[in-house]
Image: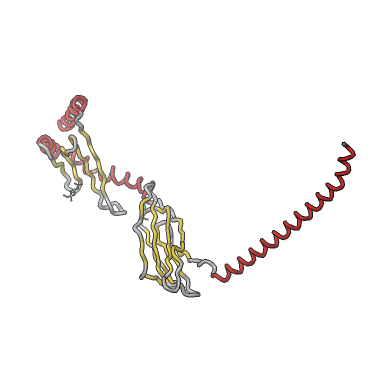
Amino acid sequence: MSVLKLFHHILMLSVFTGAADGYYYYRWTQCIYSSPDLSDMVFIDGFYFNKYPDVKYNSTVGQFVGFTELGVKTAEIWNKNPEILQQYKAQVEVFCKPNAQLYEAAIYNKTVQPKVKLSLVMPGDSKHPALLMCSAYDFYPQPIKVSWLKDGAVVTSEVTSTEELPDGDWYYQIHSELEYTPTSGEKISCMLEHASFTKPMIYDWNPPAPEFEWDIQLIFTIESAALLLGIIIAAAGFIYYKIRSTDKILVPHLFTQV
Ligand SMILES: *[C@@H]1O[C@H](CO)[C@@H](O)[C@H](O)[C@H]1NC(C)=O
Ligand SMILES: *[C@@H]1O[C@H](CO)[C@@H](O)[C@H](O)[C@H]1NC(C)=O
């Protein structure tokens, strides 16, 4: 109980000195872990004066450690109190783990599928290879694997990838480029592996239609445009003729009015 009184005393002190001089006494409680099953959970409870730790509890150590003269004395007293130590020891189970589970369910275990775009950065010609880009946008979480496939087999050479780039809104994007010499009949695909997918997702590259098809299409376009123009001119000529012939009839009518 004396320990709690001391603790309150420190807080009261901070309130008064804080108001007068702008000193800052605060407590920072952390639950630190990296294992998905929370088995490496560490509970840290630190008391700080301005930027400096006064006294800290670390569940791995299982004791308080003092950093200032007052902190060392405080740690000594608190470490002698089995009731306080017991309470602190329990925090990993009663405070950290349940909260971590809540956060995991609310945030970490959420996934968002990427929006994927395959594009031709540079068409190849007889001298240069073509450059393809596979872009994945707006995915979460960060880890992702982008691979290129040629007829189903993974291509490793001539591949350049960016890191996962944070968009600053929890989402990430990544871009991967493949240099390749197009050969007819081959199938190029981009493969993504991400937590939001149950299996690797494969996106096939559909090359733009070859040139001769464009030519045929162009000819058709020109032909239909010419045909349309012909119809318009013919229609205009007909309307013009009709108006002129109407005018001719109206002219004597106007004269009779005057
Ligand atoms: C807690 O104590 C362990 C063991 O001494 C140490 O490795 C770890 O860095 C400490 N954690 C913090 C946040 O001080
Ligand atoms: C989060 O996902 C991991 C891995 O799939 C799973 O082990 C864990 O139980 C999940 N946690 C929650 C709170 O759903």
Q: Count of labels shown?
A: 0
Q: Is residue 116 left or right of residue 75?
A: right
Report the quarter where the C terminus lies. Answer: top right
Q: Which residue lies furthest to the right in this view?
A: 256
Residue 94 appears in which quarter of the rendering?
top left
Q: In this view, does 129 lie to the left or right of 242?
A: left
Q: Position of residue 228 (x, y in %)?
A: 70, 59
Please name whichever residue, 185 or 251, is drawn nearer the observer in this view of the structure: 251
Q: Is residue 19 left or right of residue 226?
A: left
In the image, is residue 171 above or below residue 184?
above
Please name whichever residue, 57 or 208, is drawn nearer the observer in this view of the structure: 208
Please name whichever residue, 35 or 91, is drawn nearer the observer in this view of the structure: 35
Q: Residue at x 78, y 52 (%)?
A: 240
Residue 102 appears in which quarter of the rendering?
top left
Q: How is the image coloured?
A: secondary structure
Res. 200 visible in picture:
no
In the image, is residue 72 above or below residue 125?
above
Q: Residue at x 81, y 50 (%)?
A: 244
Q: Position of residue 221 (x, y in %)?
A: 63, 63
Q: Is residue 257 left or right of residue 142?
A: right
Q: Residue at x 20, y 33 (%)?
A: 25
Q: Position of residue 160 (x, y in %)?
A: 36, 64
Q: Position of residue 246 (x, y in %)?
A: 84, 48
In the image, is residue 202 above or below residue 90?
below
Res. 134 visible in picture:
yes
Report the quarter where the N terminus lies. Answer: top left
Q: Residue at x 15, y 33 (%)?
A: 3
Please name whichever residue, 71 or 184, is drawn nearer the observer in this view of the structure: 184
